[in-house]
Amino acid sequence: MSHLKDIRLAAAGEKRLKWAGQDMPVLNIIKAEFSKTKPFKNKRISACMHVTAETANLMLTLKAGGADVTLVASNPLSTQDDIAAALVKNHGIKVMAVRGEDNKTYYEHLNLALKNKPQITMDDGADLISLLHNKYQADAKNILGSMEETTTGVIRLRALEAKGKLKLPVIAVNDAKTKNMFDNRYGTGQSTLDGIIRATDVLLAGKNMVVAGYGWCGKGFAMRTRGMGAKVIVTEVDPIKALEAAMDGFQVMTMNEASKVGDIFCTITGDKHVITATHFKNMKDGSMVCNSGHFDVEIDIPALAKMSKKITKQVRTNVDEYLVGSKRIYLLAEGRLVNLAAAEGHPASVMDMSFSTQALAAQAVATAKKKLDIKVHNVSEEIENKVAALKLKSLGIQIDKLTKEQAEYLAGWESGT
């Protein structure tokens, strides 16, 4: 059973799927391994992820490993309808995802993914696992483990664990170095910039860009935006990250102060109401506001709507105009992930590492001799090193190895000055 926009989009989706696949050499190596070893034979995997060309290649890797795969969207505006069609028509994977689906449809799809009784789940934002804990707790015991792909999801799952309510083992794929140091920093950095430019065609040079949050995603975006000539302002609640931003050469101030001078605002925090009514009141005419955090709660959109005397939808594709008094505030991509809603998400080359880590973590769960402890687990160093080594090899890069003498020195304590 699948729910798509139009199965006739499959041919176009297949071209894009293959284009992305040729830039994912590590995942292709893992796919070839899985085709032989079949680690997911007789296992059902339900994945709640962004339905993109890169995700499609991960799904094909899981299927090659013997899995019965069901894919649903993790965000209503991130689905690429042609990719969904290609997966269903050409590859026999069950997909329930339609770009722009309403909240009711979104949760219908999540429910169907869990009613399929998966033994392994994959999440991007923890909506699937959240629903499982709220509605399908009895099924949790049958799940060998879940992979979580993004910062927001890991935050939610660690909160669940801290309260003693987590019902199944989770692998925090997002926290792997082969994910957050590259996907979050270089992927989000580039794709967020891409989404803003596609939506607005704005010249960034000379603009005051306010970046809310200086985690890996915020660092990458701030770095890329500065490279385009913008004057970057960082807002933070973490004193260590704020200090790091200052020493990286960025202006650091409160959002209350930044809202008075910013031209473009982008939230990348994983928290809610980072930009509020107070900040909207401070903003200049023509200010642009967007979000690259997982959920559309970082910007208080209901407050913006309430204080606006007129709202004009789609003054440009993916741009809504809110008239607050006599000034215009432009909201991009309805406050959802601007890099996926207004662009195509992260480049395949960087997702190659994230999804290779995801695939190998799922294999570790599926082939473990006993079920993992119920907690949030980190990705093993063995998986991290394998993905990094394969990526270096695909780039034609060689690195040094420790000599026996060096290894002994690092492992000992006797030698001194």
Image: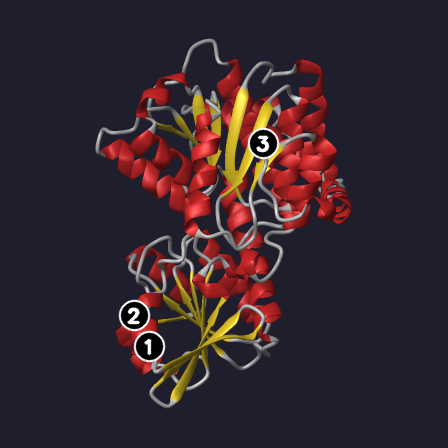
Mark 2 touches mark 1? (CB < 8 Å): yes
C-alpha separation, residue under disc 2 versus residue under disc 1: 9 Å
Label 2's element?
Answer: helix
Q: Amino acid at mark 2?
A: Ala
**Of label 2 and label 1, which has the lower sequence position?**
1
Which circle, 2 or 1, is nearer the viewer?
Answer: 2
Which circle, 3 or 2, is nearer the viewer?
Answer: 3
Residue position marked by numbered label 2 in the rendering: 303
* Viewport quadrant of the C terminus: top left
* Viewport quadrant of the N terminus: top right
Residue drawn where x is 58% and y is 44% of the image:
51
Q: Is residue 301 above or below residue 22?
A: below
Q: Position of residue 64 (x, y in %)?
A: 68, 24
**Of label 3 and label 2, which has the lower sequence position?**
3
Q: Quadrant of residue 164?
A: top left
Q: Amino acid at mark 3?
A: Met
Q: Is residue 312 above or below residue 66?
A: below
